[in-house]
Image: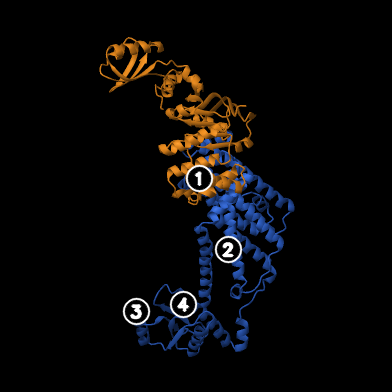
């Protein structure tokens, strides 16, 4: 135990002290924050500002369109009105094809063949790819035509407003489920990222030690189990430190006013129990996947060989992703219950179930017991592979060889 | 009280027999040489001695007790293929390795600094390993193996890759440790080094012990039938009937006699021919000669197709 602690401590201190750690800790959240705030800022600012022409004989319709396109919720367009004629069409067409013109397109409205029918709309765009303008026009035309139709049937403008006002659905009572799903999803992404970033570091650190051949001195006093456990804990602690720093920073940022204005108000807070589950499952999941990475590191001699094997880390995660939706749809189904007990899935799926439904305590306890046993088993197996592997050197072992190695002591 | 006692240990990897029925005993205050060509099972034997691998059969006893991992804090080990953490500072590294051998941090620090002074590498203390020369790195590993004042020091090829000055410095250190009652085992395929250092030796070849014992006894078992003569003038004495084989390297002759007591007759013959001798010495066979002779006599030698691979 003392030795494991020493190994973990060395691993942790050596890694935390590097410039790389400092850089990653500062730069990654900066980049992510810039991305997040940047996109949301632009999304809020973005209004379609194209300049188009509307050609119609119906001035009331034309003005209604002009009014809405100019001052709509997502549009700030400049609209010129024209009376239809062959000359107008020719001018507009030529404007579309000269590079100097500012017109993004024109909307040609043909009056209905019989009165009471809808007019026919044609939109000629300069660029076929200008989807946002097209979409904006389509939306506005829909609204305006419906309104005109209703007004034409003798309703008052006030009635029309009332009918066409958008409906708000109150979902605040479902808030917790949504938050739970969001949390589970966030957790999944976090887990994936952390495992890819730090799980692989565990493997890499083991390979590095093989390369520098320090292990032989270490193994003169400590056992491979202690060594691998120390590596998993040490490298893991580095990851947790970094995530901890990020989380703290994220909390600090999200408590600022700008951020809460972006999120659009409070949702139900996550309960303390749920936070505890989250942390416990996260820790176990992290250690579990790190130990798989350690096993991969024990089996391989170089970074390249490791690359070929990292699907063993990704595959269980992909399986969880697949099951995620099944569990959300029916968290109490037999499938969900069985799958969430698989040690590789428990960190994600059992945690999700606890936030979606009532999970019997024995299931939760069982999931932790299974994860714990799996971790111990993986470390045990990989320490054997490690010992025989490094003492024999040479080529990458195949499966029958690995099985035979397990029998060696 | 023997420090190390191996009894008929055997280790097989897949189909290759690494060590077969090896027994040896190392007493305190002795320098023990484990000799053998590359791949003969030296490293495998050492690994079983310190519990890195477990023998398939046979027993290992350390400090007169059945093998126990706790004994390992009393052992200092310098592996053949050695390494240090490249990016780590030398002092931190030594402290870390000292702590793994149950030293406190403060004690490990103090001893590290003392040792670095003793081996004349004080300037390396604050550097990272990757900034050091190979010889310096080797000295640091040497220190790492000795930091916790082990009673048993095991060194696998300790002098390989060292320049003569540093090799001598390390040899002197080992000799001093022996004087303080430590047991030292080192493996090597360089017979000349062993000759002056070791009290006892074991020669293993293809996993089996072919010769072992006290250095004097081993040498005593072989007749002193070799003569080295440095001469000028007539060389007809080399054809004297007592000579089995002779090599003449331009005035320095190495002669093998039929029996040790014929040396006098040979000397008389040379003098009577008027050969001017500056030296005529009856010498015991070198360890290397004993080694090659012993190996050639084993059945395994024939199996291997007449190769010693030393």
| Residue A289 seen in the figure | no
- Mark closer to the observer (1, 4): 1
Per the image, the residue denoted by label 2 is: A246
Answer with the quarter of the image where residue B306 lies: top left
- Label 2: state its secondary structure: helix
Position of residue B170 measured from the top left corner of the image (x, y, whole percent): 47, 37
Q: Which mark is residue B117?
A: 1
Q: Secondary structure at mark 4?
A: helix
Residue placed most toward the observer, B162 or A43? B162
Q: Few, some or many C-alpha atoms within 10 Å of disc 2 (few <14, some 14-19, many ≥20)?
A: some
Q: Do callouts 4 and 3 point to residues on the same chain? A: yes
Counting the numbered discs, the total is: 4
The disc placed on residue A97 is 3
Q: Tell me the CA gap for discs 1 and 4.
A: 79 Å
Q: Secondary structure at mark 3?
A: helix
Labels 1, 4: one chain: no
Q: Nearer the viewer, mark 1 or mark 3?
A: 1
Position of residue B25 relative to residue B71, above or below, is above
Foreground mark, 2 or 3? 2
Instruction: State which tag comes first along the sequence, 4 or 3.
Output: 3
- What residue appears at the point 47 percent right and 41 percent down from the top-left corner? B138
Name chain A's colour.
blue
Q: CA distance from mark 2 to mark 3?
A: 52 Å
Furthest residue in direction right, as rendered: A361
Question: Which of the 4 quarters of the picture holds residue A147?
Answer: bottom right
The first of marks 2 and 3 along the sequence is 3
Return the mark for residue A133. Answer: 4
């Amino acid at each position: 135990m003392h030795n494991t602690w020493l190994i973990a401590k060395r691993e942790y201190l050596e890694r935390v002290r590097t410039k790389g750690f400092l850089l990653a800790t500062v730069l990654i959240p900066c980049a992510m924050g810039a991305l997040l705030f940047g996109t949301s800022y632009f999304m809020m600012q973005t209004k379609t500002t194209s300049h188009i022409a509307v050609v119609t004989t119906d001035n009331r319709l034309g003005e209604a369109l002009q009014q809405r396109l100019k001052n709509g919720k997502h549009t700030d367009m400049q609209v010129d009105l024209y009376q239809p004629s062959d000359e107008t069409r020719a001018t507009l067409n030529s404007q579309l094809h000269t590079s100097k013109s500012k017109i993004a397109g024109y909307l040609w409205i043909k009056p209905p063949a019989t009165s009471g029918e809808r007019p026919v709309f044609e939109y000629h765009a300069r660029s076929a790819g200008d989807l946002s303008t097209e979409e904006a026009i389509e939306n506005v035309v829909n609204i305006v035509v419906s309104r005109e139709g209703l007004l034409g049937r003798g309703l008052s403008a006030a009635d029309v407003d009332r009918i066409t006002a958008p409906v708000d659905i109150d979902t605040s009572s479902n808030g917790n489920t949504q938050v739970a799903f969001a949390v589970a999803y966030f957790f999944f992404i976090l887990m994936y990222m952390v495992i890819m970033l730090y799980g692989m570091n565990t493997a890499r650190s083991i390979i590095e030690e093989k390369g520098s051949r320090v292990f032989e001195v270490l193994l003169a006093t400590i056992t491979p189990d202690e060594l691998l456990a120390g590596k998993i804990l040490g490298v893991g602690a580095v990851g947790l430190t970094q995530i901890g720093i990020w989380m703290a920073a994220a909390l600090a940022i999200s408590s600022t006013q700008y951020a809460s204005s972006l999120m659009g108000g409070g949702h139900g807070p996550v309960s303390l129990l749920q936070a505890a589950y989250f942390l416990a499952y996260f820790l176990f999941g992290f250690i579990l996947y790190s130990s798989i990475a350690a096993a991969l590191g024990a089996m391989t001699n170089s970074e390249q060989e490791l690359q070929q094997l990292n699907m063993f880390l990704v595959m269980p995660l992909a399986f969880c992703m697949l099951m995620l939706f099944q569990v959300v749809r029916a968290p109490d189904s037999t499938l969900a219950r069985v799958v969430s007990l698989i040690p590789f899935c428990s960190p994600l799926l059992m945690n999700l179930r606890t936030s979606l439904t009532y999970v019997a305590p024995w299931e939760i306890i069982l999931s932790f017991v299974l994860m714990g046993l799996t971790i111990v088993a993986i470390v045990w197996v990989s320490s054997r592979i490690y010992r025989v592997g490094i003492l024999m050197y040479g080529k990458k072992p195949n499966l029958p060889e690995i099985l035979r190695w397990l029998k060696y002591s | 009280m023997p420090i190390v006692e191996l009894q008929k240990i055997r280790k097989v990897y897949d189909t290759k027999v690494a060590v077969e029925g090896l027994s040896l005993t190392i007493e305190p205050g002795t320098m023990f040489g484990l000799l053998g060509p590359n791949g003969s099972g030296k490293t495998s034997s050492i690994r079983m001695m310190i519990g890195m691998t477990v023998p398939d059969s046979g027993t290992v006893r350390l400090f007169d007790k059945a093998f126990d991992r706790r004994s390992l804090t009393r052992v200092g080990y310098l592996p053949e293929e050695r390494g240090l953490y490249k990016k780590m500072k030398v002092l931190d590294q030594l402290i870390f390795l000292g702590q793994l051998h149950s030293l406190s941090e403060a004690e490990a620090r103090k001893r590290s600094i003392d040792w670095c002074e003793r081996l004349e590498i004080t300037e390396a203390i604050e550097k990272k390993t990757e900034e050091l020369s190979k010889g310096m790195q080797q000295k640091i590993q040497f220190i790492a193996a000795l930091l916790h004042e082990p009673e048993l020091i095991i060194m696998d090829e300790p002098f390989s890759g060292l320049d003569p000055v540093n090799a001598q410095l390390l040899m002197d250190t080992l000799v001093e440790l022996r004087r303080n009652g430590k047991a030292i085992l080192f493996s090597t395929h360089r017979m000349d080094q062993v000759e002056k250092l070791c009290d006892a030796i074991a020669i293993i070849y293809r996993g089996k012990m072919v010769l072992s014992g006290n250095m004097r006894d081993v040498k005593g078992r072989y007749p002193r039938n070799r003569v080295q003569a440095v001469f000028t003038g007539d060389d007809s004495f080399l054809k004297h009937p007592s000579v089995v084989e002779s090599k003449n390297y331009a005035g320095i002759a190495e002669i093998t006699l039929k029996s040790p007591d014929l040396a006098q007759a040979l000397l008389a013959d040379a003098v009577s021919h008027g050969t001017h001798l500056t030296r005529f010495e009856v010498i015991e066979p070198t360890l290397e000669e004993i080694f090659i002779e012993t190996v050639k006599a084993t059945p395994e030698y024939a199996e291997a197709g007449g190769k010693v691979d030393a």
